[in-house]
Amino acid sequence: MYKQDFVKVACVSPVLKVGNPEANVSVILDTLKDLDASLAVFPELCVTGYTAGDLFFKRSLLDETQRAMQRLLEKNPFKGILLVGAPLEVDGILYNTAFVIQQERILGVVPKMYLPNTEEFYEKRWFKSGFDIADNRDRIRYLSEEVPFGHLVFKEEAGRLSFGVEICEDMWAPFSPGNSLALQGARLILNLSASNEYLHKQEVRERAIIEHSRKNAGAYVYASAGMHESTSETVFSGHNVIAENGRLVAESESFAHETEIVKADIDLGKIDHRRKNHSSFRDTHDTALTVAAEVSFRLAETDTFVFEHPFDRTPFVPKEDVITAFEKVANLLENALIKRIEHVRPERLVIGVSGGIDSSLALLVAARVLKRLDRPAADILGVTMPGMGTSDKTLRLARSLMSALGVDSLEIDIKEEAKRQLQTLGHDGKSHDVTFENVQARLRAMMLLNLANRHNGLVLGAADMSELALGFVTYGADHLGMYNINAGLPKTLVDFMIGQYAKTCFSADVADLVAEVRSLPYSPELVPGQVSEETLGKYEINDFILERFLRAGDGKERIVSLLEETFGLAKDKAEAYVENFFRRFFASQFKRQATPDGPKVLDVSLSPRSDFRMPSDISR
């Protein structure tokens, strides 16, 4: 399964019989018949069993292994790339190796470099490290064929799929072979392992795999031996782990007594995007300690791609350890504002309160901050400014929320002043055009800034990251403030945060009001009945596009396919969303260039001073 730079990988912990290559290859062949993946990784020495002990010295086992490997090549039903572990004899010396196979062809053989020889492991009794031979030989003869051997990077001829191979202990070295292979272009490191189990080892192993994927800016696929290895001295659990860019993607450790398969979809586009943006990776590229030879292969793309797990429709919103995640984000926001208050020393925080979720979140954060600073809530000046499109419901909610929080409130009706300005501009005051809307927006911003001067205050801006991405802010108005507390929060995360704040930090009265705020359609209310999503499309979908663009660097075609997959959109509808998003995004950089300071909350942001730098007049 390989399409649109997604590749499906599988880790397999097979049922096996120690010392019986024929039986083990039969299990491998049966497993491969219906395996829907493009890369299948089996454990270390799975053809013989890792725990065969001194049987590795016996000619009978080595001959049986060759015959079993010949059968595997002849009968292989798998169209993708297969990796199996087997002992290999070269000039009378044994090596613990990984065979990389595509159908009837051995693409290459990789020897294990680091051999554990302490505590329960004593591999040097049977095998020799691959370092010396790999430095001196780049091919070996096996089953009457010359095949690549040693330090190898496998690269698909027509695409971006590339991988290197490690075997178990190699991963645990201070500088692993996989680190070197990643620096030479391997986007995935595939590890054939026989890692035994004891108390807390699972956690240590998992951390190591995730960390390798992070520093390699790639994926790490780890397939380990299962319960059918000998338990004479130690136990194997079949701990299979797949990680990508420092994130755990899939994992199993079930002590299964049947063949176990763990699959995951690796995002090659996201890996490439990470490597382009990772300056330390770029600096170390082509500085590998060992030079690997390239082995090319072909892998056809599939017409369809069935994802292992559905894509998260709201990728910016925490799904696990929700309370911990909320507290972390809340601490970021609150401590950022505390630092700014300590620096500016304002007597008041001035906030425009509209009755919508963005200004309501800014108000809740400010209330928490003043409480932490032992200052009265009345040091917040909440200002509601009803205009031409303000509804009775949002006006009531703005008034009620300020009252419930005990902040000092001020109401300034801007309708008459807006009419006067429109008249001065020669506007008829009836056409609901951009001038009609923006006169009101700028009046509100001017009023807040003037009030801050009047009260020695700090205007807390509330424009969120989604609005900044889509340019759905008025230049010189709601995208300005003296500190923009919401700048690092996409709309879906704003909604999550305000819900959690109300639920965990405030009274039931405040929670009820916030629930009402969240139930309203998103709107700047600059004209009667205005609904943001009627212009922009759903924020949930726009945030999904934003996440794919910022985190994976995806282009239009790829995002369209993911919108079809994730939201069930028809292709024309998905294309319209993507076209609208990018048209607005590239046209709005001039607004983002002039945004005020605001805290970064996620691993991505749109700050023109740090995360996203682009000319305002770019042509896309």
Image: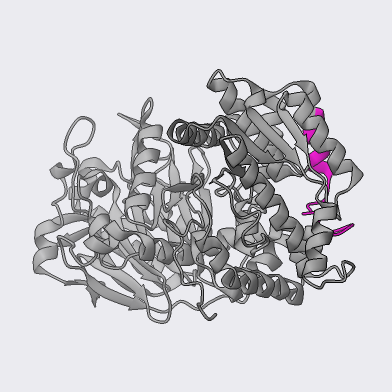
Q: Could you say which is closer to the camera, residue 537 or residue 364? A: 364
Q: Could you say which is closer to the camera, residue 271 or residue 405? A: 405
Quadrant containing the C terminus in the rendered view: bottom right
Please indicate, yes or no, whether residue 230 appears anywhere in the rendered image.
Answer: no
Q: Is residue 571 magenta?
A: no
Name the residue rendered at 29%, 75% in the picture.
295
Name the residue rendered at 53%, 68% in the picture.
554
Quadrant containing the N terminus in the rendered view: bottom right
Name the residue rendered at 84%, 43% in the picture.
394
Magenta stretch bounds: 512-530
Name the residue rendered at 65%, 41% in the picture.
451
Counting the numbered discs, the total is: 0
Q: Is residue 279 above or below residue 250?
A: below
Q: Could you say which is closer to the camera, residue 244 or residue 418? A: 418
Q: Where residue 564 sits in the image (x, y, percent)? A: 70, 68
Q: Where residue 9 sits in the image (x, y, percent)? A: 48, 59
Q: Is residue 419 above or below residue 340?
A: below
Residue 416's image quarter? bottom right
Q: Could you say which is closer to the camera, residue 290 or residue 28? A: 290
Q: Where residue 401 sits in the image (x, y, percent)? A: 78, 31
Horizontal relation, residue 334 to residue 234: left or right: right
Horizontal relation, residue 34 to residue 127: left or right: right
Q: Where residue 84 sits in the image (x, y, percent)? A: 36, 58
